[in-house]
Image: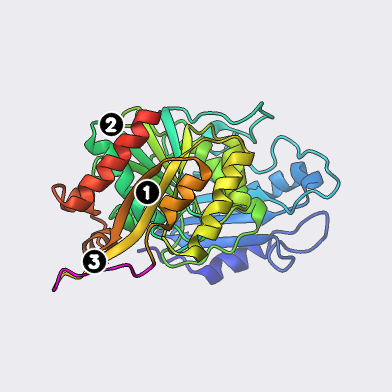
Amino acid sequence: MSDVKREQLIEALKTIINPISGKNIVDSGMVQGLVIKNGDIGYALNIDPKDVDEMEKLRESADQLLHQIYGVKKVTSVLTAERNETNEPPKKVFGEKREFQGKPQQKPFGGHGTPPPQEGPQGIPGVKHIIAVASGKGGVGKSTTSINLALAFSKLGLKAGIFDLDIYGPSVPRLMGLSDARPESLDNGQITPLKNHDLVSMSIGYLMEKDAATIWRGPMVMGAIQQMVRDVKWDLFNPVDVLILDLPPGTGDAQLTMVQNIKLDGAVIVSTPQDLALIDARKAITMFEKTNTRCFGIIENMSYFICPHCGERSDIFSHGGAHQTANEKGMEFLGAIPLDMEIRESADAGNPIVISNPESEHTKRYVEIADKILEKI
């Protein structure tokens, strides 16, 4: 365990003065998202994009100072900003992520600056096919579905991975059974994906303190997503055949950043059967339609419940709504997954049902759905 205290870091950072405002970077509100995990420090500096050159020097000074504190092993920082109201493009260093390992680096973490303007979405190096799993609404079991789909692809003989894009509520570390794990830095500045169940993964949850709230503004969220896309060496173990993107609920900054920057093979919508969930699922479908992203189909999760004692079926959240929506939208209904305690318990334990009970009827359903999607790519 690290002996580094938050108060130590704050007091140290208060000695760093912004030469433009004349105020220290803590009291002026520049330091945001400060986290400590086993001696690794992470934070963001909120800046005005026009001052990026000066702020980059300031960031380097802050990194060097923090690294001098006993117990600090590594410092990772990022420059971020509010949206640019002047519509002027940010300079090339804006938004770069950095890592300090004892002396100032001459290039950013990952060896990349802010990516140059690109004509449309791009693929991810080391990844052959990319599939987004979205819901539009939280609480429908999207992440549990995502991890079991990824494992189902693996069961079909593919090298699979999962990329957790839910910055505010990352679930993949728990689902992977890797809540306390942390990626490592490679010599080229990239970071390693984490592997379990023969599945590679990345999540902001691996980089944050456990149970810490991610209180980030939109630009910080978008910057974090872009940096993880660039900096993770997905093919460290093997080239990835299929990468599942576990999207956050809604149709906001994170989803749009992903669609605009990552070349998707297609998207899968997860919804429960009731009308309230389907309203938001339709919004997610509309977002993908407007961004010219193919929707492979809809999965109805928590479709029904079978009592383990008497065998009676109950449609707790109604039934068939996702199937009906798929018909209305002219897309395939990929399948129904029941509300079942074993699915929930195995996911909470970090040993999802496709791994923990590979011969179960639930596993067969996930594999059947994965097989349908595979035919489309």
What is the secondary structure assignment of the residue under circle 2? loop
Report the magenta stretch's main SS: loop
Find residue 253 and name its label.
none
Find residue 146 and name its label.
1
Q: Amino acid at mark 1?
A: Ser
Q: Amino acid at mark 2?
A: Leu
Give how far apart the Cα atoms at labels 3 and 1 are. 17 Å
- Which segment did they paint magenta? 309-317
Image point (16%, 47%), residue name = 358
What is the secondary structure assignment of the residue under circle 3? helix
Question: In the rendered structure, does residue 36 fall within the stretch colored magenta?
Answer: no
In front: mark 2 or mark 3? Answer: 3
Find residue 158 and name its label.
2
Q: Is residue 96 above or below residue 30?
A: above
**Position of residue 128 measured from the top left corner of the image (x, y, whole percent):** 41, 27
Q: Nearer the viewer, residue 26 or 260?
A: 260
Q: How packed is label 3: few (under 14 Cα within 10 Å), some, or many (20 or more)? A: few
